[in-house]
């Protein structure tokens, strides 16, 4: 196996389940390190950082949601996929916290592999916006597509994968109404378990970041019956 192959952490309770999925992913050319808990994953990350982590939703000790929340609060943009999440509320909550993808049961190893590859692609390849322009002014903020961040004065905020995907797509298509389905595809990879309501929640988070008055948005506007539109400053 190539030393440059993507490296994954597979975090779960059952050694047999981890071994089966881990073995399949290794057969497909990925490097896999298994961990029995989120705490073990976090300890190992300081010595050997992966490209992506797969976490079972139910873990002993720190839950997958808690681990995700902690990493995102620290500004860590590690790719995160949660496996075996419960109902839609749990899945939407995981995405809002900052998970890159969420899979409910049942799921097969081939689907997991496809989701892993999709998240790795999103992390490695920036949309055309990065090549087309540098900083985009949004009120008092500057959106830096290359750095995946918003800057206001001296304060820089890293964007999660969902918020980044949404904002990059909106800014790349100014004054064009984009459907929730399209925005869901660019931000979540269109996982079937996630509804378009996740886009509404992410847009609300973006508005809280960039709008002077999120209740009366100037830059990220709702187009009734069609979706959302980015309106640049005149």
Image (tube, helix red, strand yellow):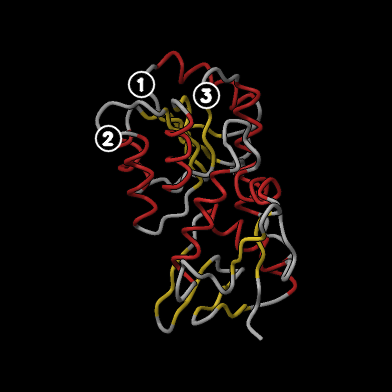
Q: Residue at x 37, y 50 (%)?
A: 71
Q: Which mark is residue 33?
A: none
Helix, strand or loop status at disc 3:
helix
For the N terminus, give its image quadrant. Answer: top right
The mark that comes first in sequence, 1 or 3, is 1
Disc nearest the viewer among 1 and 2? 2
Helix, strand or loop status at disc 2:
loop
The mark that comes first in sequence, 1 or 2, is 1
For the C terminus, give its image quadrant. Answer: bottom right
Q: Which residue is mark 2?
A: 62
Label 2 close to label 3 by CB (< 8 Å): no
Look at the picture and state if 21 lies above or below 215.
above
**Circle 1 Cα neighbour tier, 10 Å, few/some/many (<14 / 14–19 / ≥20):** some
Look at the picture and state if 78 lies above or below 2.
below
Helix, strand or loop status at disc 1:
loop
Q: Position of residue 180 (x, y in %)?
A: 66, 49
Q: Residue at x 55, y 68 (%)?
A: 147
Q: Which residue is mark 1?
A: 13
Q: Residue at x 60, y 34 (%)?
A: 30
Q: Judge from the rendering whether residue 110 lies leftward or rightward of residue 106; answer left or right.
A: right
The mark that comes first in sequence, 2 or 3, is 3
Label 1 close to label 2 by CB (< 8 Å): no
Look at the picture and state if 48 lies above or below 205.
above
Disc nearest the viewer among 1 and 3? 1
Q: Position of residue 134 (x, y in %)?
A: 65, 78
Choose between 102 and 225: the one closer to the eye. Answer: 225
**Circle 2 Cα neighbour tier, 10 Å, few/some/many (<14 / 14–19 / ≥20):** few
Q: Which residue is mark 3?
A: 22
Disc nearest the viewer among 2 and 3? 2
């Amino acid at each position: 196996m190539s030393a440059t192959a993507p490296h994954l952490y597979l975090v779960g309770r059952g050694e047999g389940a981890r071994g089966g999925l881990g073995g399949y992913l290794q057969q497909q050319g990925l490097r896999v390190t298994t961990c029995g808990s989120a705490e073990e994953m976090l300890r190992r990350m300081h010595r050997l950082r992966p490209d992506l982590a797969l976490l079972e939703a139910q873990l002993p000790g720190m839950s997958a949601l808690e681990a995700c929340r902690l990493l995102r609060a620290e500004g860590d943009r590690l790719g995160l996929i949660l496996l075996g999440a419960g109902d839609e509320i749990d899945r939407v909550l995981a995405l809002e916290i900052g998970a890159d993808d969420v899979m409910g049961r049942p799921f097969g190893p081939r689907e997991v592999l496809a989701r892993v590859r999709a998240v790795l692609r999103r992390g490695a390849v920036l949309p055309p916006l990065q090549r087309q322009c540098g900083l985009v002014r949004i009120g008092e903020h500057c959106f830096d597509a290359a750095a995946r961040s918003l800057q206001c004065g001296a304060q820089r905020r890293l964007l999660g994968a969902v918020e980044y995907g949404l904002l990059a797509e909106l800014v790349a298509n100014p004054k064009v109404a984009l459907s929730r389905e399209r925005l869901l595809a660019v931000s979540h990879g269109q996982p079937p378990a996630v509804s378009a309501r996740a886009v509404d929640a992410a847009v609300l988070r973006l508005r809280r970041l960039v709008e002077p008055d999120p209740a009366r948005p100037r830059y990220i506007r709702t187009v009734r019956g069609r979706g959302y539109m980015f309106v640049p400053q005149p």
